[in-house]
Amino acid sequence: MPSFRAPMILLLAALAVVAVACSSDEGGGTTATPTAVSGTPAASPTSAAATPVAQLTIGMILVGPRDDRGWSQAHYEAGLYVADQLGATLIVIDKVNPADSPNVTIPQVVDDMLAQGAGLILATSDDMKDGILEAAAQHPDVPMIWASGDSAWKDGKSYRDDLTHLGNVMGEMEFGKMIAGCAAALQSASGQISYLGPLINDETRRLAASAYLGARHCWTELRGESADALSFNVTWIGFWFAIPGVTLDPTQVVNDFFASGSDVVISGIDTTEALVRAGQVAQSGSTVWAIPYDHRDACDLAPQVCLGVPYFNWGPAYLSAARSVQDGSFTAAFTLVGPDWSDINNPDTSAIGFTKGEGLTAEHATQLDSFIAGLADGSIKLWTGPLNYQDASAFLADGIPATAQEVWYLPQLLEGMQGASRAN
């Protein structure tokens, strides 16, 4: 699209594109301290980049602000990590979404980044699906990673064998959400837990359901309570974060949760409204708790009411992809990265972690550790039947484990959960 290259450069500058140049020489490096992740690579390779790249420039596209203490910041810090490790240059544009950047498309952003020398493109949101598929088709020889997508999964519903240089990376946050649900159930006095959801799709259903499964297990098995005494309500705001006039106001949704009797709110959105509001409500004398999402340090905004945070570490997975571009071995693979069960909070080896919050009591923290150990050794397998869908239709028979596809493409919430399974 050469006719619009110059206007796009000006537009992206106005939207705060930055380039972070990192040196591998002594005294070099970034000015921020990144959070790293690990990954368990490799699933469905389709094609390889042929030419090694000595000095790599990485283009990263973020759906939200890079300092949101959530999803986008976790990706941004991973980009800094990779740039620092490789002495690479990082080009970043954030707030690429219909509200903040209504006239900017993903193919336009990719074109501009390629014009600036990018040799690897990282598109970091499910919301970027159509745009990154289009960009990958327009630039079939450029290595790209679409985080959370399934275009390179040969057994997936959206597999594209024609996009030979578009790979996928996704963290197995199902485990993090199970841990979050367990922490909520252990701490709750009322047994009423609420889940602040973003928009409704396969990803958000499976993560909300994972939180419910963790909550139900710890409510019944560790606390010895009846499953019927547990309430798990989901409200969706309509996007990954608040857009005035478009989504529900997450702060008001949290107010409604607490007013209805919930004492723990688990967040599934990219930003920290649930935790912030819980901190404010607690200051007025109520005993309430919250569990934020995505970013390791999210609890810092209201530590006293934070039970912990399940978070992503994208750095090593992105580092592996970047190194493969450098040495010419890049393959378009569908890659799931999970916890390092020997230490889920190891910043160099674990893709999914859980930082315990100050609000979690010592007793409950010990119980949570036993739950994590059960996930680690396989003695706790929550995506195993008997499980029904929310409409009471059969999902998994007794003792039957879910397949990767059944979890990934979960079509409904599960029986026992309240809230919409599909968008109206």
Image: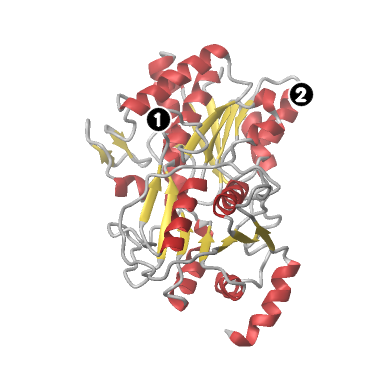
Give the camera-side residue of 254 and 289.
289
Percent x, y of residue 419: 49, 41
Residue 167: name its quadrant. bottom left
Is residue 391 positioned above or below 136 on the image?
above
**Chosen colour scheme:** secondary structure
Does any portion of residue 393 appear in the rendered image? yes
* Kind of residue at badge 2: Gln
Q: Around disc 2, counting alpha carbons within 10 Å, would you say few (fewer than 14), some (14 to 19), or many (20 or more)?
A: few
Q: Mark 2 points at which residue?
A: 283
Q: Distance between the residues labelled 1 and 2?
A: 36 Å
Foreground mark, 1 or 2, reads: 1
In the rendered view of the protein, which quadrant contains the N terminus? bottom right
Mark number, residue 86: none
Disc 1 target residue: 341
> Going 70% across and 57% down the picture, which residue do you hit?
245
Q: In this view, does 212 lie above or below 97?
A: above
Q: Residues within 10 Å of mark 1 (few under 14, many from 20)?
A: some
In terms of depth relative to the viewer, which is nearer, 86 or 313? 86
Kind of residue at badge 1: Trp
Q: Identify the element where label 2 is drawn.
A: helix
Q: Residue 16 appears at what percent x and percent y?
A: 73, 63
For this rendering, which residue is in front, 369 or 247? 369
Viewer-side residue, 250 vs 108: 108
Residue 400 position within the rendered picture, expressed as x and y whole percent measured from the top left: 22, 35
Vertical order, 100 against 180 (above or below): below
